């Protein structure tokens, strides 16, 4: 019996060593892909084409695929759309106060024609005395872009889509993008100084638009 004790001890020691070795060999937990800081990316590129395996969008968007991609400026923080009429939204930072971007899509042919939307946006602003709404039309990546720039007081809206009180010293950029499965609508509002500083970025975003393949 005394001779068996050393052998039993050796067996127990070997088992403990084997368990410890397996524990050390275990791989550390992996970090999910895409968990990096989004702010370090050059731009938030939104592809609004819903993959086939993804669930259909909420009711009111009018289409399972918005069919458009574009790059929101990297300095404009994005957030989840606050209504089912929006496909994207972002905050426009500025020392004079923050502005806001909203992108709308109502399905192929939905949302009205270009001129009706331009006039509706003009009607949301008490145009500043001595100014006129400016507009421009250009083509990019096979899409037709018409945009408008309106300075004045942003007016309250009974539809709940505007400010609750009149906002003097404001500015509105609105754009209609026409193309296959369009149109799409971009609207940005905020203090005039903020929007002036954001104008180049807004136009760069419009020029980045392309039909999703």
Image: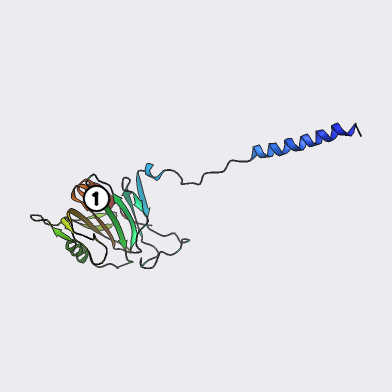
Crowdedness of circle 1 by 10 Å Cα count: few (<14), some, many (20+)? few
Viewer-nearest residue: 97 or 119? 97
Instruction: Give the image location of residue 206, x and y in percent.
Output: 27, 53
Q: In this view, does 131 lie to the left or right of 60?
A: left
Instruction: Give the image location of residue 34, x and y in percent.
Output: 46, 46
Furthest residue in direction left, as rendered: 130
Instruction: Give the image location of residue 122, x and y in percent.
Output: 17, 61
Quarter of image, res 69? bottom left
Viewer-nearest residue: 179 or 20? 20
- Compared to residue 94, the image places residue 134 above or below, namely below
Q: Is residue 51 left or right of residue 2?
A: left
Q: Residue at x 46, y 63 (%)?
A: 55
Instruction: Give the image location of residue 165, x and y in percent.
Output: 21, 60
The C terminus, quarter of image: bottom left
Instruction: Say which residue label 1 marks.
Output: 203
Q: How many numbered circles are shown?
A: 1
Quarter of image, res 147? bottom left
Q: Which residue is drawn at 37% across and 44% down?
A: 39
Viewer-nearest residue: 162 or 137? 162
Which colouring convention does the figure follow?
rainbow
Judged from the image, the secondary structure of the residue bearing numbered disc 1 is: helix
Q: Residue at x 31, y 45 (%)?
A: 75
Furthest residue in direction front, as rendered: 165
The N terminus, quarter of image: top right
Viewer-nearest residue: 57 or 96? 96
């Amino acid at each position: 019996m005394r001779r068996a004790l050393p052998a039993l001890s050796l067996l127990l020691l070997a088992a403990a060593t084997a368990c410890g070795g397996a524990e050390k060999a275990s791989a550390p937990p992996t970090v999910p892909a895409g968990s990096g800081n989004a702010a370090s990316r050059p731009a938030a590129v939104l592809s609004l084409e819903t993959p086939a395996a993804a669930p259909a969008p909420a009711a009111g968007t009018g289409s399972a695929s918005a069919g458009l991609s574009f790059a929101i400026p990297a300095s404009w923080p994005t957030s989840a759309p606050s209504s089912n009429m929006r496909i994207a939204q972002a905050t426009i930072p500025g020392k004079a106060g923050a502005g806001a971007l909203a992108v709308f899509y109502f399905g192929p042919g939905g949302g009205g024609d270009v001129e009706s939307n331009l006039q509706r946006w003009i009607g949301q602003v008490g145009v500043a005395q001595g100014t006129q709404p400016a507009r421009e039309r250009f083509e990019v990546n096979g899409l037709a872009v018409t945009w408008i720039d309106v300075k004045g007081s942003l007016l309250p809206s009974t539809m709940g889509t505007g400010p609750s009180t009149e906002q003097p010293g404001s500015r509105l950029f609105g754009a209609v993008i026409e193309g296959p499965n369009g149109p799409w609508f971009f609207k940005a509002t905020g203090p005039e100084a903020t929007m002036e500083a954001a104008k180049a970025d807004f136009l760069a975003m419009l020029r980045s638009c392309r039909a999703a393949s």
